[in-house]
Image (spheres, rainbow, N blue to C red):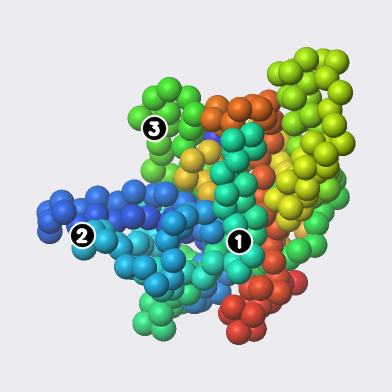
Amino acid sequence: MGTEIVDDKTLPWMVTIQMKHNYSKLNIHTQVFCTGTIINEKYILTAAHCFQGWTKNEILSNPSASLVIGFGSTNFKNQTLIEFNNKMIKIHPRNKNTNNGIFGNLLYADLALIELPESSKLNLFSSSQNARSIKLTNRLPLIKTKTLIAGWGWIKPFCEVNASIEGKTDKLQSGWVELMENNLYCVNEMEVSLLQQFNKTFGQNLNIPLCLTSWIKKITENNWSDKLCVRPSPSSIQYGDSGGPLLVDFGDSWYQIGVVTQGMCNKDKKFISNQDYATFTQIDCEWIQIETKGKVLCI
């Protein structure tokens, strides 16, 4: 993520999503695995891939483990915690997560909501809770706009050796990234990148058949059409930032326009290792309105 440590009052809609292990009364360990945002007193917005492999009907197999949301402080160790379970997780109905040997993980409609029970809903008007909601919009700013990202992700690239040891941080960090032109630009960049890698791998004079270029186009358009791409400027997305917001200041207020889907460490990808941008999934206003029964509306 970035290098700027955020104070408690700056981004009060930010939350951690943690796994809490109760080994004993005196041995409790929590680990941040994703970031999220408060969009209403009862709803948290994050990424669907944070819960990959889980369903709403599953129960965590380990009785000593539980899922928690942390809020109210930029240091996750000082946060107020709310427990939630898999039945409270709402995954976007068009979400899909497949692994492709060339493209790596393909994520579409990478959005999830956590619905808090009535007994745990947030008091967004209490100064003691330090919790506020972020406004949502699917309106996009001008191209190459500097946008703000924030999260509890590692401060070193997660594909580097020893990053898991040296790169962790307890505190919320934020930083600036540059929004690329639009989602179609995202798709085109991916198509060009992949074709270049095919030429590099199989020879510059390879005559790529039309069926192959059509296949590449279909894959990219099916999986990147709902994405926004950002380039580090100078901040980047790392492990733990997933589910965090892409924020734009439209003058009157901060708005969230996207959710972190994918960072830039691509060592495991066979071809597109030269990707120099991270991807966000655009806000789906209609789905959020339906799932929240009209309580959360985009502006």
Q: Is residue 12 visible?
A: yes
Mark nearer the viewer, 3 or 1: 1
**Closer to us: 8 or 18:** 18
**Closer to us: 67 or 196:** 196
Sooner in the amino-acid sequence: mark 2 or mark 1: 2
Residue type, mark 3 in image: Ser
Q: In the structure shown, which secondary structural element does the residue marked by tag 1 occupy? A: loop
Residue at label 2?
Answer: 64
Residue drawn at the location 85% of the way across and 15% of the way down = 205
Percent position (x, y) of residue 124? 50, 74
**Closer to us: 235 or 184:** 184
Residue drawn at the location 78% of the way across and 15% of the way down = 203
Q: Quadrant of the N terminus?
A: top right
Percent position (x, y) of residue 291? 59, 78
Residue type, mark 1 in image: Asn
Sooner in the amino-acid sequence: mark 2 or mark 3: 2
Q: Is residue 98 above or below residue 91?
A: above
User: Is the residue under label 1 in contact with that under label 3 (CB below 8 Å)?
Assistant: no
Image quarter for residue 191? top right
Residue drawn at the location 65% of the way across and 55% of the way down = 108
Q: Is residue 53 above or below residue 299?
A: above
Mark nearer the viewer, 2 or 1: 1
Q: In the structure shown, which secondary structural element does the residue marked by tag 2 occupy? A: loop
> Which of the labelled discs sits on residue 164, or is there none?
3
Residue at label 1?
Answer: 95
90 to the left or right of 203: left
Q: In the structure shown, which secondary structural element does the residue marked by tag 3 occupy? A: helix
